[in-house]
């Protein structure tokens, strides 16, 4: 009889844990933080290139800028990164726009070089699903993708 009680308690604990986990809602993205070397330059870059709305940040220390990303959460720029870092293109932020052609005009007007996935300058990648995308770097060298996914 003594062996049955611990086994039963273990089984009950397992079912309780499973039930509790099933009631837990999936996590939701709250924000993305990007460490930058020049906060003013990066704030102007992200604000004008992507037309992002700046939102209040609680720290008020001159080392942070927060932008709304709508339902996706927020983008936090944080002052303090060392310059001249090299980032891999596979690690990038992606923004969707209604028209890649219009967005490319914005990049061109700001003299921001862009490329396709393979690195061909001034080219656009056409994915197999018909989505167009371009890649470019922010002032610190972080890779950014912009596509026309709906």
Image (tube, rainbow, N blue to C red):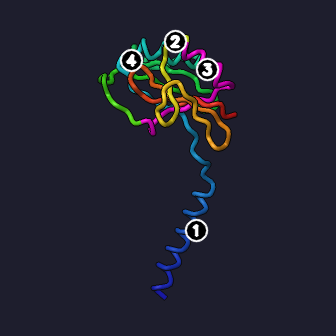
In the rendered image, residue 58 lying in the magenta stretch gets the answer no
Which residue lies under the disc numbered 2? 110
Which of the two discs, 3 and 4, labels the residue nearer the N terminus?
Answer: 4
User: Residue 10 vs residue 53: left or right?
Assistant: left
Q: Nearer the viewer, mark 4 or mark 1?
A: 4
Which residue lies under the disc numbered 3? 103
As measured in the structure, the alpha-carbon distance from the residue carrying label 4 to the one carrying label 1 is 47 Å
Is label 4 in a helix, a strand or a loop? loop
As measured in the structure, the alpha-carbon distance from the residue carrying label 4 to the one carrying label 2 is 25 Å
Is label 3 in a helix, a strand or a loop? helix
Q: Position of residue 121 (x, y in %)?
A: 48, 26
As measured in the structure, the alpha-carbon distance from the residue carrying label 3 to the one carrying label 4 is 29 Å
Which residue lies under the disc numbered 1? 15
Q: Which residues are magenta?
A: 89-108
Which of the two discs, 1 and 3, labels the residue nearer the N terminus?
Answer: 1
In the rendered image, residue 105 lying in the magenta stretch gets the answer yes
Which quadrant would the C terminus be assigned to in this image?
top right
As measured in the structure, the alpha-carbon distance from the residue carrying label 3 to the one carrying label 2 is 11 Å
**Mark 2 Cα within 10 Å, few/some/many (few <14, many 20+)?**
few
Q: Are marks 1 and 2 in contact (CB under 8 Å)?
A: no
- Residue 63: assigned label: 4
Q: Residue furthest bottom?
A: 1
Is label 2 in a helix, a strand or a loop? loop
Is label 1 in a helix, a strand or a loop? helix
């Amino acid at each position: 009889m003594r062996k049955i009680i611990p086994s039963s308690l273990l089984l009950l604990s397992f079912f309780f844990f499973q039930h509790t986990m099933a009631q837990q809602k999936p996590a939701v993205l709250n924000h993305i933080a990007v460490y930058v070397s020049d906060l003013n330059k990066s704030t102007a870059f992200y604000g004008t290139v992507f037309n992002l709305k700046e939102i209040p940040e609680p720290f008020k220390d001159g080392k942070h800028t927060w932008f709304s990303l709508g339902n996706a959460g927020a983008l936090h720029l944080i002052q303090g990164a060392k310059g001249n870092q090299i980032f891999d293109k596979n690690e990038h932020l992606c923004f969707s726009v209604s028209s890649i052609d219009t967005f490319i005009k914005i990049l061109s007007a700001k003299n921001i070089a862009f490329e396709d996935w393979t690195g061909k300058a001034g080219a656009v990648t056409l994915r197999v699903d018909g989505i167009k995308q371009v890649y470019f770097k922010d002032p610190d060298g972080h890779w950014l993708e912009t596509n026309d996914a709906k």
